[in-house]
Image (tube, helix red, strand yellow):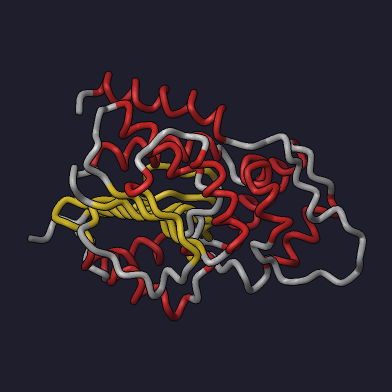
Amino acid sequence: MKIHKLLYLYLMLEKFLEKVLVLSRKDKVFEDTNPIVRAFEFNENVAHVFDDMAQRSIPHYRDVQSMAATLALTFYQEGSRIYDLGCSTGTTIALLLNGLKDHNLSNYYIKGIDSSAPMCREAIEKISSIDYEKDRILIEEGDILEEPIENASVVIMNYTLQFIDPLKRENLIKKIYRGLNHNGILLVSDKTLQSHTDISRIFVDNYYNLKRKNGYSELEISRKREALENVLIPYPIREEEELFRICGFEAVDLFYSWYNFSSFICLKKGQ
């Protein structure tokens, strides 16, 4: 695909994001002053405001979504499958669907899996506003550790791997690698750690400054940090890259990085 076509695709997806992100529902999940902070979960309250939460909590969220969708559509092989593991409210799937339609591709199949029933309901509602063939997309509540991956040219995990038990991550990535076709890709975005604690601390400080700029109070930042402890477990960048390589991926590169957030593209070149 030529550079000008990639740029067109990226800009088209950026514009489409304005329509699908539901930012009118403001994230106030952690405004509560109750002294008991429960472990973070993707429940009804979170799902209802997730688009706003992601936009204000994840650096350059729109850019990363558009980049991931552009790469997915670039490597997509017609007749194969696209999996979105941890599909949340279906924003990525909506972008992919719009891109496939824009390129007049009809022989596709997209499956979104999420362990949260409320997230799946939000995703189904979002996708239902787009015209598409109903048998081409399936959004389903389920365990991505159990989900079979077959005839895939693209597998996406946007801020999902970081929530998986570290002891189970290798088996998950190996399963994905086996299920990918030749020249298929895995796209992963995660919060990451740095090689030195001083650098990590500075990066985290800059991240919290971003959240303050986006309207979160000190209370909200503190309570969410406490809620995510031992729920979201980041890897150092080098360790995450090594995980992808030992699971078989011949080419692993960053396609985005902002302080303590990183996005990886992993290419399967094996026969």
- Taking depth in this image into account, of 216 and 198 the one nearest to the observer is 216
157 vs 183, left or right, is: right
Q: Residue furthest front?
A: 134
- Taking depth in this image into account, of 91 and 259 the one nearest to the observer is 91
Rendered location of residue 35, percent (x, y): 91, 69
Determine whether 117 is above or below 129 in the image.
Answer: below
Examine the image and state in which quarter residue 95 appears. top left
Rendered location of residue 193, percent (x, y): 53, 60
Question: Residue at position x 56%, y 45% from top?
Answer: 125
Determine whether 244 is above or below 82 in the image.
Answer: below
Examine the image and state in which quarter residue 8 appears. top left
Rendered location of residue 68, percent (x, y): 39, 42
Rendered location of residue 227, percent (x, y): 73, 66
Q: Residue furthest bottom?
A: 167
- Dividing the image into 4 quarters, which one contains the N terminus? top left
Determine whether 205 is above or below 99 in the image.
Answer: below
Question: Residue at position x 24%, y 34% from top?
Answer: 105
Question: Residue at position x 61%, y 50% from top?
Answer: 203
- Taking depth in this image into account, of 118 and 158 the one nearest to the observer is 118
In this rendering, the count of numbered labels is 0
Determine whether 222 is above or below 18 in the image.
Answer: below
205 vs 252, left or right, is: right
Question: Residue at position x 80%, y 58% from top?
Answer: 222
- Dividing the image into 4 quarters, which one contains the C terminus? bottom left
